[in-house]
Amino acid sequence: MSTTAFISKQIEKLPPGQVFSYSTFLKEPDQREATIKALNRMVEAGKLSKLAKGRYYKAEHTVFGKLGPDLYQVVKDLLEDGGKVTGYLTGYSIYNKLGLTTQVSNTIQIGKNDVRSKLKRDRYTISFVRQKNEITTEHIPLLQILDAIRYIREIPDVPVLSSIVRLNTIVNDLSDSDQKKMAALLLKYPAATRALAGAMFEQAGKDALAKKLHQTLNPVTKYKMPGISSIIPNAENWYFK
């Protein structure tokens, strides 16, 4: 069986939108060039779509046109390494998921322990945010919420106070176990993030967690957030003004 015939048969088994590289079909190292050429010929023939150099997918065709892969597939190789989680989606796509904004962005933000320069893939710009905590599947939902608190001023098309209301509800609705985990993760976030999350914990009656966070703050440092006391009455105790 020729390389092209072998690859075509394997691609038929893949679901639409799944992103893959030439190495997915590489049986022998000396077949690398032949594999890449076969995939590129399939792109030229319209049988495959190319996301970026070395990254391909089988597009789904609908009455509305050709559908590309979802965000996770676009950046999956940047989120996993050998089956181990090394990064997570954060920023604009998560603001939408958390109900903080309806805006959809062409920028994909990824949290990683080691960041790198921005890159382009198809219509997307991919940027990176440094995460000091260990990144695990269990931590990711909490890190996404904490990133939203940290970058609350950057949430598009929504007043900061409205974002605080929504995030306050999200934090209050977490289980006791998740709130404890979040408080531990907060220790590696900037002081302003610890202060805002701590005020939310205190308002929710989580006094023990709030006290630990409060002890990490410098009382001399003040955080400007006009109007926050109308939403979180205890905000002044957390050095907001």
Image (cartoon, rainbow, N blue to C red):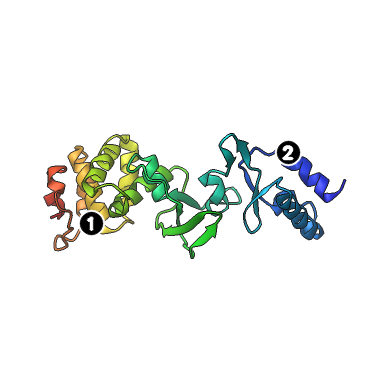
Quadrant housing the C terminus: bottom left
- Residues 41 and 97: in front is 41
Residue 11 showing in the rendered view: yes
Q: Nearer the viewer, mark 1 or mark 2?
A: 2
- In the rendered image, residue 222, in percent from the top left (x then y), is placed at 16, 60
In this figure, what is the number of numbered marks? 2
Circle 1 packing at 10 Å, graded few (<14), some (14-19), many (20+), is few
**Residue in the image at 76% along x and 53% along y:** 41
Secondary structure at badge 1 equals: loop
Secondary structure at badge 2 equals: helix
Residue beneath disc 2: 12
- Residues 13 and 140: in front is 13
Q: Is residue 13 left or right of residue 166?
A: right
- In the rendered image, residue 164, in percent from the top left (x then y), is placed at 24, 45
Q: Amino acid at mark 1?
A: Thr
Residue beneath disc 1: 216
Quadrant housing the N terminus: top right
**Residue in the image at 24% along x and 49% along y:** 160
